[in-house]
Amino acid sequence: MNGILEATNIDKFIALTPLMRLGNNRKRRDEMMVYFRHIVLKMLHDEGILSTFEKPISIEDAAKKSGWEYPSDYVDMFVSILANDKVLKRSAGVMGNEYSLSSGFKLAEKDPVVHHFEDFDVTYAEYVKNIPARLKGVSQEFTGTISLFNWDSALASQLYQAVRDSAFAFIDKKWLRNAKLLDAGCGPGYETADMWVKLAGMNAEITAIEPDEGLIKIAEADFTRNVKKAGLDIDPNAKDVKLPTFHQGTVEKLEFDDNTFDAVYFSNILHWTPDPPSAIKEIVRVIKPGGMLFGAQSGTETTNPYMNLVTRTIKNTYGFFSRQDFTKWMIAAGIKFFKTATIVNTFKGFKRG
């Protein structure tokens, strides 16, 4: 047995239901595709980067002309994305492939209208500004003052709420009764508070970690407010209430002993890590034999290359990967009975005993 199980139609429907409440998810995805393509190409146009390719030029000469770092897999990815999208035309030159602006390329006159992202668009619009520096070999930090504020807002959105609801709908919550649960990559704490509310009365002990110092401070300071926002009237400061604990830390190097947790949850964190397979192995290390790993992790099937280009401007990020690779890495790390469902890749599995 390879450790993979096909999710039943009932499993899939249950996991999909919270996302269906958002409306047409295909329309949401298509809107995202149009949006990211436009904001990247508009920046490249406004910064004069596209003018580098007014005449046929090799990647090496384009890098030399523009002061880009090269050799660079980021520059190679950048040019490949534009060529595959037919923004650039690939032709055979004397020294190899050359690239020039396609005659049919035209930038849209108006910015696309965004209906479904709830501040997620604003966050990535800030990251797009990092592309010129990244082409020169300079990566950026995950959060600064502006992006910290935007992430705080975006991660509280209906979209992320639906992703969490999908992950919890996909599992049997009885596994979390009296469980030690790790929330890996808690962001500003909305998901930790929501998780705490979902598990009210189940005597679960939640530990939350987040690598960004600014976000973990928000998560801890705003926990009471977030619990009320999640819809629970119980005072989280009452004596008989078991509060989560918050720690700054990364999934690449967890400061916990082997076999510490009964379950680990994460949502859309692996593309921000430098080495997703190693991060998965480290997460699995701290799960008890037979314990559960669940959550959601969007991949290349539901994102687009321009979104990946923007993501890769952040220091030590791998970027998005396929569901097939995700599954392969999970099995290799020791997860059995692994199942996935939904457009956002809701998943669950158990550590081999």
Image: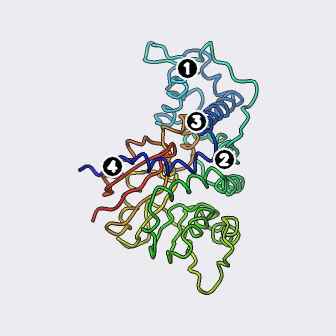
Q: Which residue is the site of mark 1?
A: 86
Q: CA distance from mark 1 to mark 4?
A: 39 Å
Q: CA distance from mark 3 to mark 2?
A: 17 Å
Name the disc covering residue 5, or none: 4
Name the disc covering residue 248, or none: none
Q: Which residue is the site of mark 2?
A: 120
Where disc 1 sits, the SS reads loop
What amino acid is labelled 4 in the image? Leu
Q: Position of residue 183 (x, y in %)?
A: 51, 65
What amino acid is labelled 3 in the image? Arg
- Residue 103 vs 195, above or below: the answer is above
Where disc 4 sits, the SS reads loop
Q: Local crowd at mark 4 within 10 Å, few (<14), some, or many (≥20)? A: few
**Disc 1 or 2, which lies upstream in sequence?**
1
**Disc 4 or 2, which lies upstream in sequence?**
4
What amino acid is labelled 1 in the image? Lys
Residue closer to the observer: 177 or 283: 177
**Disc 4 or 3, which lies upstream in sequence?**
4
Q: Position of residue 110 (x, y in %)?
A: 76, 27
Q: Local crowd at mark 1 within 10 Å, few (<14), some, or many (≥20)? A: some
State which quadrant residue 180 falls in. Answer: bottom left
Q: Which residue is the site of mark 3?
A: 26
- Residue 9 vs 61, above or below: the answer is below
Q: Position of residue 211 (x, y in %)?
A: 54, 62
**Labelled pair 4, 2 in contact (Cβ < 8 Å):** no
Q: Which mark's residue is nearer the viewer, 4 or 2?
A: 4
